Amino acid sequence: MSAKSEYGKEFENNANLSVHKEIQKDEQSCSEREKTFNVISSVAENQSNHTGEKSYSCSECIKCFSQKSSLVQHQRIHTGEKPFPCPECRMSFKRKHHLETHLRAHTGEKPFQCPECEKSFSKKSNLVEHQKIHTGEKPFPCPECEKCFNRKAHLDIHLRAHTGEKPYLCPECEKCFTDKSSYNKHQKNHTREKTYSCSECVKEFNEKSSLVKHQKIHTGEKPFSCTECGKCFTHKSSFMRHLRIHTGEKPI
C-alpha cells in the first residue's frame, strides 16, 4: 500500500515515507543554519565597520579590510580582473562606479556644476579642483621655491624645472619636453601643414602667432621695454631673461 507525504509525493510504504520525512527535516535544518550563518556574518561585518576591526586580509599583500566586498575589489589589483566592460567601447573596469563615471564620456553627462560660474564636470574630483580657481586656494607648495599650485599635477610639472626632467621625447627629432601640452604643440611641426607664410622671406609657420612673432624681425618692432634701463626687446622671453639682471633672480 502506498503512502503520501504532506506535499503529495507517493511512496511504496510507510518506511520509505518516514525516511523521506527525515531527509526533509535535515534539509530544513541546514537551510535554517545557513540563514542564521548569513545573518551572523552580516552582523559581524557591520560590527567591524563600527569597531574598525579589519578581519579580511589579502593573501597577496599585507592589506586588511573590514568588509569582504572591499577585499574582493582590492584583489582585482593582483588578478587584473576587470568585470565591468563598457558597452560603447573596448574599455573595462575593476569597479562599477568607475564604469559609471567613464560612461559619461559617451553620454556627455556632466552632473557636477560649479555654483560660482555654472561650469559643469563629469567627475566630482574635477569640480573640486576647479573650485580652487574661485577660492584662490593653492595647497601644493613647491619645496624648492616659493611657488604654490592649485593642482598637484601642476606642481609635478613645475618640479621638472628644478630637476631638469623632460619625460616627453619627440620620436621625429628627439627633442624633449617637460609637459605633455608643449610636446603636443611641438608635434604639429612634424604633422601639420604650414599654412602661414612670411611675405618678407621664405619661412612658413603652422600657427599664426608664430608668424606674427617672426615678422617682428623684419619690422624691427620691439614692444617689450625695460623700465629700469630702457632697453627694448622683440620677444617677451628675451625681455623676461633681461629683467633678471636687475632683480638678481637666478634662472631655474
Image (cartoon, helix red, strand yellow):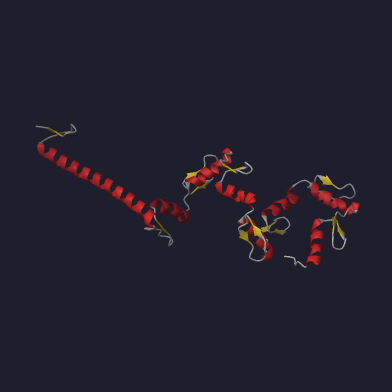
In this rendering, is residue 186 above or below 20?
Answer: below
Q: Position of residue 246 (x, y in %)?
A: 81, 66
Q: Position of residue 4 (x, y in %)?
A: 14, 33
In this rendering, is residue 105 above or below 49?
Answer: above
Circle count: 0
Horizontal side of residue 107 vs 210, given as left or right:
left
86, 52: nearer the viewer: 52
Residue depicted at 75% across the width and 47% down the height: 192
Q: Position of residue 195 (x, y in %)?
A: 80, 44
The image quadrant where one finds the C terminus is: bottom right
Residue depicted at 87% across the width and 61% down the height: 231
The image quadrant where one finds the N terminus is: top left
Q: Position of residue 79 (x, y in %)?
A: 45, 54
The image quarter in which residue 63 lies: bottom left
Horizontal side of residue 64 vs 136, given as left or right:
left
Residue depicted at 38% across the width and 54% down the height: 50
Residue depicted at 14% across the width and 41% down the height: 19
